[in-house]
Amino acid sequence: MSGEPLSKRERLTIGRQEMPTRDPKQRSATFDEVNLGFTERLAMLEAQRCLACKRATCVEGCPVMVDIPTFIRCIEDGDLAGAAHSLLIDNALPAVTGRVCPQEHQCEAACVRGRKGAPVAIGHLERFVADWARGNLHDESPPLHPSGRSVAIVGAGPGGLTAAGELARRGHDVTIYEALHLPGGVLSYGIPEFRLPNEIVENEVHRLVGLGVHIECNVVIGRTCTLDDLRDRFDAVFISVGAGLPMFLGVPGEGLKGVYTANEYLTRVNLMQAYAFPDADTPVLHGDSVVVIGGGNVAIDAVRTARRLGASRATIVYRRNRPEMPARAEEVHHAEEEGVSFEFQVSPVAIEGDGDRWVTGLRCVDTELGEPDGSGRRAPVPIERSERVIPCDTVVVAVGTRANPLLTSSSPDLALTERGYLAADEHGMTNLPGVYAGGDIVRGSATVILAMGDGKRIAGEIDSYLHQL
């Protein structure tokens, strides 16, 4: 970029640039990615909105501590290679986080410009740089001199992949063990193609393999081999298996045909390509009237998927009000554009069926918000004589997940919390020396970027531990 730098006043006159998207009517029938990405011109304009604050509060809001001012300044200067190098130093999966990270609650929430208007679109700029790098940058920095130390990582999800990249760059020999047949974890099976194309995940994984990371799929730690086997073979172990055991409502009718957990529903569609039926081997029920129970990102992903599979009516049922929905505002907006309906302050009490077979409706009651519960949010209270039935032929339950006991039950020496998650100290180490844990298996169901933050932080702790051996 030539010419004098813009003044603060000039920067303040530039409005936030809108992300181009596919037409709602067209995209609701396909799994093509909804957001189209910034052009270089839009990225340059958005970068010029950054005030280059002396105290970069945006960085403080980022779980992986990306040097946001530096990569944005490089965009403004037209140095896209510099922006990419800066970003890749801090973030192992920038093309992923640029698409699915809830920036509005983190870096953008801390942006100074957001105090009197719209914050800088940090996530959109991150995606732009990562996508540019994928097509133009091929000179990955080589890892450090081999350390002679080895690390096993259990789980090829966002936390495990991030830790692997950090440790490989430090010269350690890293092997990831993944239970499924593709790496990526929730990135591959839990987030739909229209939000995060599998090609993006594959490219990010390929870049890590280029750093020397080994990935072995179809290996279930606790069945194929044990944690003790890994401890015998490696100098350290990082467990990042997520919390993938789905939770149920505990209401009558959950055993009816046409009832799915969101985990199964999205896995069948994403990993088993059920959206390609009849060409795919593992289809999913293509309901005409689908109700999804929940208010998080997974629920929104499921209901938007139902629309793309042909549902003429796709409805979210959420027991609290709209402002309390934990889902990203952008995804809720996109769902509304695509014809999704919302039933707020409604609580399910039973799933009804045709005898003991197919789903015919969701019996529910209206609620009002009472006193705050343990989470600090006002608890839903049923309203008397408000019971009614929402007709449907498919129900998807998206009310959260908990720790899968497969690994922990085969490793009785591992200390657990009262809720069944792995117990770890402030350094991420479990009660077993050299065995670390992070992500959802420690903190409970959370976001991709928080798991990545754990992976990056704990990789540093593992590196320090290995240097002490």
Image (tube, helix red, strand yellow):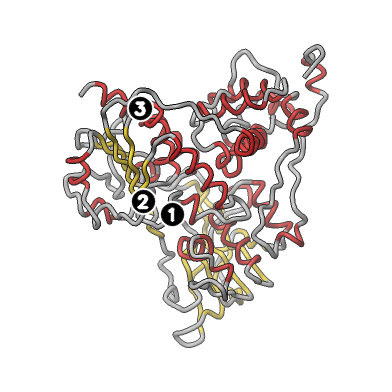
* Residue in view at x 43 percent, y 48 percent: 445
Q: What residue type is labelled 1?
A: Leu
* Residue in view at x 42 percent, y 76 percent: 255
**Taking 258 as reference, is 299 above or below it?**
above
Q: Which of marks 1 and 3 is in front?
A: 3
Q: Position of residue 362 (x, y in %)?
A: 55, 73
Q: What element carries label 3?
A: loop
How far is disc 1 from disc 2 in space, using C-alphas?
8 Å
- Give whichever of discs 1 and 3 has the lower sequence position: 3
At label 3, counting other C-alpha atoms closer than 10 Å, the crowd grade (few under 14, some 14-19, many 20 or more) is: many
Numbered tag placed on residue 182 in the rendering: 1
- Residue indicated by mark 3: 171
How far is disc 1 from disc 3 in space, using C-alphas?
25 Å
**Taking 357 as reference, is 421 above or below it?**
above
**Taking 270 as reference, is 463 above or below it?**
above
- Residue indicated by mark 2: 178
* Residue in view at x 58 percent, y 67 percent: 275
The part of the image, by quadrant, that contains residue 341 is: bottom right
Q: What element carries label 2?
A: loop
Q: Do the residues under discs 1 and 2 have CB atoms within 8 angstroms?
A: yes
